[in-house]
Amino acid sequence: MTLYLKDARYLDAETLEIREGILAVTPGPAGELTFPDTLPGADSLQPGDRVIDCRGRLVTKSFACGHHHIYSTLARGMPAPPKIPTNFVEVLEYIWWRLDKRLDRDMIEASALTAAVHMAKHGVTFCIDHHASPFAIDGALETIARSFEKVGLAHLLCYEISCRDGDGPRKAGLAETDAYLSSGRKGHVGLHASFTVDDGLLKAAVDLAAKHGTGIHIHVAEDAADQEHCLETYGKRVVQRLSDAGALDSPHTILAHCIHLSEEEKALVRQSPAWVVQNTESNLNNNVGGANYRELGERVMLGTDGMHSDMLRSAKAAYLIGQGTEGISPDQLYRRFRAVHTFVHGMGAQGDGDNNLVILDYDSPTDVTPENFPGHFVYGLESGHVATVIAQGRVIVEEGRVTTVDEGEVLAFARQQARRLWDKLRVNG
């Protein structure tokens, strides 16, 4: 089965070269993208072949998210917390830790399906997620994986293990991670943050990651409180603690945020093979500050931190705030936006090959060229320009409509589960 895109203006996501003509896309994790000179005649098409007329529209590689929290999907419009948070730790205590404790399997499924639909409609076909549901851990990762795949998204998942809810959830998090990775799924060993992870758990997580040939996925110095706790408890700063434990040794490790780092910690990050993920809008929302990510090296990618599922929006925010924090250029920002593909490829994960594409109805009043595309990327391109999305050679969004699931049914299920979750929040305070 081959999908043919005719009258396409294909923009190579790496070289930014533009070529006009026909694209041939084959399905599956190992599917390919080729450029035939001619379109097969109607009598030459094989059963299952299809032709889409791009009408001269721009076609390029679809997008990927380097750090998400799909468990926050049902939070939109949620009841107010019992106390208005006055700092970052209270944001966690009174909002997110109250919410994640009340999630159950149906809520997780609704969150994953809805987030996957939103990502697909915004051109995102690969997601690296960091999940939390401390009293509904068993089977949570497989639930998310199957929900993503139902919509058509590929993924790297993990459960954010911590000590904050006691020995039961800590052990369950390790067991869930081991079971998921032992099943043949690729993913990470997730940890919440240094200030909720004791030495025993940190060692267990590093050992588990080594067992499965993967890395750690952890929040790092998102707020100064993480550093303060680490210094008071362990006599060292967060990155030094992670480095001493071997958590930075893997090229598959993801360090989220990395805002409040010393010069010595920045050097440790640069010298390690670990990756950093920037989540600008979440940092602004939580008032934790910003960072000069250029000081952390080239292995920096972008995420949403659960704020939303729109990577183009995240990229614009990173560019705008980056004018004041690091003087980033459109070209540098675009490379950071695309860096997640390099990370995924390094993980050996399937589902992010050349047969993942977006057709953009980008109505620019000016020419788009290889030289000026980064300018179009930051100043012109919006998620509203995403018309059709192809994931692993299969059309999952066509002219703005999700084709793999009934979006109305997904949203109805999500609203039902959100009401259940909100009732729990109201009853338990």
Image (cartoon, rainbow, N blue to C red):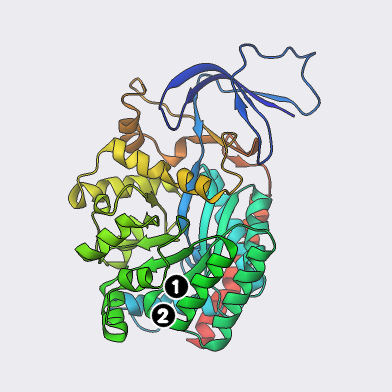
Based on the displayed image, in which of its 4 quarters is residue 255 positioned?
bottom left
Three-letter residue code for mark 1: His
* Residue 350 in view: yes
Where is residue 24 drawn, in percent x and y?
A: 63, 24
Dot 2 crowding, Cα within 10 Å, few <14, some 14–19, many 20+? some
Q: Nearer the viewer, residue 256 or 239?
A: 239
Q: Is residue 84 above or below residue 30?
A: below
Q: Horizontal and vertical percent for residue 295? A: 24, 53
Horizontal arrangement in the rendering, residue 256 relative to residue 388 (left or right)? left
Total number of numbered discs in the rendering:
2
Could you tell me residue 49's position as x and y percent? Answer: 74, 26
Residue at screen point 30% across, 32% down: 375
| Relative height, residue 297 to residue 94 (above, below) | above
Asked whether residue 160 is in view, the answer is no
Q: Disc number at residue 359?
A: none
Foreground of the two, 82 or 209: 209
Residue type, numbered disc 2: Thr
Q: Is residue 170 left or right of residue 44?
A: left
Q: Which residue is mark 2?
A: 196
Q: Are marks 2 and 1 in contact (CB under 8 Å)?
A: yes
Taking depth in this image into account, of 43 and 298 the one nearest to the observer is 298
In three-dimensional space, the C-alpha distance between marks 2 and 1, rounded to whole angstroms, equals 7 Å
Q: Residue at x 60, y 48 (%)?
A: 153
Side of 197 relative to 390 (left or right): left
Q: Is 354 displayed left or right of 312 in the figure? A: right
In the image, residue 80 above or below residue 302 = below
Q: Nearer the viewer, residue 183 or 285?
A: 183
**Residue that carries the numbered disc 1 in the rendered image:** 192
**SS category of the residue bearing label 2:** helix
Q: Position of residue 414 (x, y in %)?
A: 61, 63
Residue 48, picture quadrant: top right
